[in-house]
Amino acid sequence: MKNEEWKMIEKHAKAWTLEAAELLKASFENTLTITYKSHIADLVTNMDKAIEKFFIEKIQEMFPDHRVIGEEGYGDDIKDKAGIIWIIDPIDGTTNFIHQQSNFAISIGIYENGKGKIGLIYDVGGENLYFAKDGEGAFLNDYELPRLDKASLSEAVIGVNATWVGPNKRINHENVQEIVRKSRGTRSYGSAAIELAYVASGKLDAYMTMRLSPWDFAAGLILLNEVGGIATKTDGKPIQLLEQNSILAAKPGLHEELLGYLIK
Ligand code: 2AM
Ligand code: CA
């Protein structure tokens, strides 16, 4: 794919995201239809579905040979990484969208043959656009994000959900507790995409979580890559793009230090 074509994809991805954000903001005036997916804390609204359909219609019209993976399942059934794939979360942080009308994002990662090309996370309430393009840097609105410096745990603010600090079946919570105690502080925002954007922009020094789907992390990984952030699974192994993964994203140095606590 040529540079010109990527410019075109970038232009449309940004414009559609801003348009979708307006639809989300306008929806605050209306009553949301809320349903449960797998359990009572796994929510989906009419707007999650409407925004995903909005993107899929635009992409199919403008780029008919591209494929789409969307959280709500209106995209393609994708088993391989060939060609151009848009990985879309129409609302990341649906619980926040419902309860707070803030701290939720539209997250879009565009990959070519499995390689991250364009990452876009729009914090709708904050009107902050995090954008990255392979080899061209990462931006917060018009501001180019600097490369991340090394950090150490004693000076770090870590994004982590309280779920992982108590007994759970996915990670030894005592290791997580040790990280929490030795850090400068912890935060939990309820949107994985925003938390990854915060690591990329230095607002968090690290973020860890035990189970994310491709649409939660696809855009964030591209942002992190442009600023020298490191992202693996919490056992240090590479993240698999089309699967659910645990995620440890951090500044250089700190990533290694955290792995030392997590792999014992
Ligand atoms: P979502 O709002 O798009 O579902 C909440 O801590 C973060 O984890 C959100 O980014 C949420 O994304 C994500 N998440 C991933 N899998 C989840 C699940 N099964 N239930 C709730 N949140 C989930
Ligand atoms: Ca979602």
Image (cartoon, helix red, strand yellow):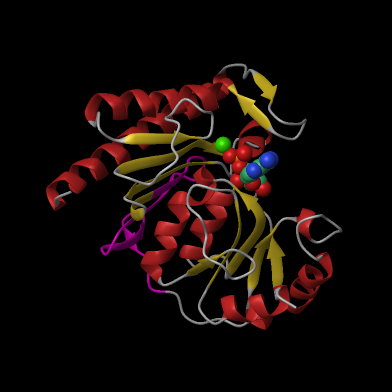
Residue 22 sits above or below residue 207 on the image: above
Quadrant location of residue 233?
bottom right
Residues in magenta?
A: 120-147
In this orientation, which residue lies closer to the viewer: 135 or 26? Answer: 135
x and y percentages locating residue 96 in the rendered image: 64, 39
Quadrant showing the C terminus? bottom right
**Residue farthest along the right direction in this orientation:** 167
**Residue farthest along the front direction in this orientation:** 79
Residue 231 sits above or below residue 131 on the image: below
Quadrant location of residue 92?
top right
x and y percentages locating residue 90 in the rendered image: 49, 34
Quadrant of picture, ligand 2: top right
Residue sitting at x 31%, y 56%: 142
Instruction: Give the mark count.
Output: 0
Q: Is residue 93 visible?
A: no
Residue sitting at x 53%, y 34%: 71
Magenta run includes residue 146: yes
x and y percentages locating residue 152 in the rendered image: 61, 83
Magenta run includes residue 103: no
Residue sitting at x 45%, y 28%: 52
Q: Is residue 123 visible?
A: yes
Residue 23 sits above or below residue 232 on the image: above
Residue 149 sits above or below residue 13 on the image: below
- Looking at the image, residue 212 sits to the left or right of residue 13; the answer is right
x and y percentages locating residue 57 in the rendered image: 34, 23
In this orientation, which residue lies closer to the viewer: 247 or 50? Answer: 247
